[in-house]
Image (tube, grey):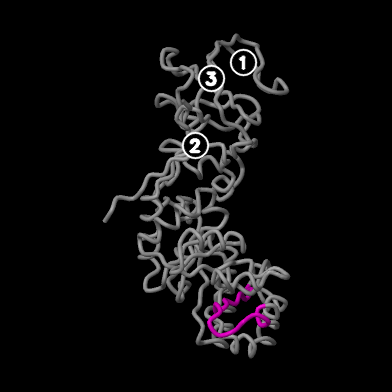
């Protein structure tokens, strides 16, 4: 008979859904009386949009945002009719009619999307959200475009007006206040629409940034929304990789591709089943680490596609065996710690976690 999937897997990714719902409740309380939505794009930041969103629905969340039409269709199939699901990228050319049957709310970002939605809009169709750019210069109508299309936007019954902060992780950045002022000016032209400006980090700015709706994403999954300060969010993921082989090595021997690491003394190596094909960044080469038997074990040499070699000399040899697990993300070394060593951000770490991991979901307790 086939073995258990956890037995066959090279790495185990645990996702604590109770921590996700706890984080959502903390953010909802912080933003109250604004409504707290949840951003589950990129397959729930790599952790599984369907199980994450179901857990959040059980906690009381009724508003969800995804990035693409296909993500929206899949989430509607997973969640059923009731929650509101909005698609940040809006209708790409030719796709507007496909929003109607699954009752997905398009975010309209430019005049072309307004024209496309006008062609399919009718009573009973989803009311669109309009995105106005206030300083990120990525998506959204310019101030001039917004005013030019204001009558049409009002006529189509836009349900909400949104924008996105560029520097919310830096509370003292002057662009935050500038963007808020521009957003207020746009809102005054469309007063009946719900207003939404803040995502994860924006929730931790002054309450005047909350408006009617907040849209947290990364903070739900444990990424620190206040870099440089204590993380108020509960950690959500634990990643551990199995040791494939243990070997002794002599002084002067090289480790890994390119002979990029030379041992300065004898040691004990453990090679684990994790690599950049699993979403563990190659930029961790020479800098990353794991934890084994309560001790930090450094990554040696270059990370390869499927394997990583750790110096486990600090761990008694009797405690290092093939099949033992090296913790890569967890209590000792969080998502943001790993991201700092990799020269990136926690968002990229989570969304890159590969499909080869065996996933274990820790469900919230029934209330």
Residue that numbered label 2 is attached to = 358
Foreground tag (1 vs 3):
3
Foreground tag (2 vs 1):
2
Mark 1 touches mark 3? (CB < 8 Å):
no
Q: Where in the figure is residue 280, as x and y percent of width and height? A: 59, 37
Q: What stretch is highlighted in magenta?
A: 117-134
Separation of residues labelled 2 and 1 (CA atoms): 33 Å
Upstream in the sequence, badge 2 or badge 3?
3
Separation of residues labelled 2 and 3 (CA atoms): 21 Å
Is 295 or 82 nearer to us in this picture? Answer: 82
Quadrant housing the C terminus: bottom left
Q: Please name the residue shown 49% across and 18% down the image.
A: 322
Residue that numbered label 1 is attached to = 263
Q: Is residue 39 above or below residue 117?
A: above
Residue that numbered label 3 is attached to = 270
Q: Is 130 in the magenta?
A: yes
User: Mark 1, residues whose alpha carbon is within 10 Å: few (<14), some, or many (≥20)?
Assistant: some
Tell me if 334 is positioned left or right of 187 in this view.
left
Q: Is 335 in the magenta?
A: no
Foreground tag (2 vs 3):
2
Q: Please name the residue shown 58% across and 59% down the image.
A: 71
Is 6 or 329 nearer to us in this picture? Answer: 6
Q: In this view, does 334 lie above or below 253?
A: below
Q: What element carries label 1?
A: loop
Q: Please name the residue shown 50% across and 26% down the image.
A: 242
Tell me if 41 is positioned left or right of 255 in this view.
left
Q: Where in the figure is residue 365, as x and y percent of width and height? A: 29, 50
| Visible residue check, residue 296 | no
């Amino acid at each position: 008979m086939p073995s258990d999937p956890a037995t066959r897997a090279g790495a185990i990714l645990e996702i604590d859904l109770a921590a996700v719902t706890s984080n959502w409740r903390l953010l909802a309380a912080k933003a109250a009386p604004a409504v707290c939505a949840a951003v589950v794009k990129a397959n729930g930041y790599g952790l599984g949009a369907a199980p994450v969103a179901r857990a959040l629905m059980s906690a009381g969340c009724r508003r969800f945002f995804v990035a693409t039409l296909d993500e929206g269709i899949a989430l509607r199939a997973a969640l059923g009719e009731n929650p509101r699901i909005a698609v940040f990228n809006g209708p790409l050319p030719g796709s507007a009619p496909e929003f109607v049957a699954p009752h997905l709310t398009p975010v309209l970002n430019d005049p072309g999307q307004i024209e496309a939605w006008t062609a399919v809009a009718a009573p009973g169709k989803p009311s669109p959200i309009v995105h106005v750019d206030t300083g990120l210069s990525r998506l959204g109508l310019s101030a001039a475009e917004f005013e030019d299309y204001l009558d049409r936007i009002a006529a189509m019954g836009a349900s909400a007006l949104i924008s996105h902060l560029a520097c919310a992780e830096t509370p003292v950045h002057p662009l935050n206040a500038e963007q808020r002022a521009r957003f207020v000016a746009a809102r005054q032209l469309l007063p009946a629409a719900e207003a939404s400006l803040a995502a994860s980090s924006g929730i931790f700015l002054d309450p005047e940034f909350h408006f009617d709706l907040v849209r947290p994403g990364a903070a739900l999954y444990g990424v620190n929304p206040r870099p440089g300060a204590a993380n108020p969010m509960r950690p959500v993921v634990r990643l551990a990789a199995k040791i494939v082989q243990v070997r002794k090595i002599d002084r002067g021997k090289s480790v890994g591709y390119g002979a990029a690491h030379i041992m300065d003394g004898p040691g004990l190596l453990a090679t684990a089943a994790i690599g950049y094909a699993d979403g563990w960044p190659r930029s961790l080469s020479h800098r990353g680490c794991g934890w084994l038997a309560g001790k930090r074990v450094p990554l040696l040499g270059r990370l390869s596609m499927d394997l990583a070699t750790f110096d486990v000399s600090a761990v008694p040899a009797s405690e290092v065996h093939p099949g033992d697990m090296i913790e890569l993300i967890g209590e000792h070394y969080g998502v943001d710690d790993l991201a700092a060593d990799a020269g990136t951000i926690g968002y990229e770490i989570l969304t890159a976690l590969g499909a080869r991991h065996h996933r274990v979901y820790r469900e919230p307790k029934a209330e």
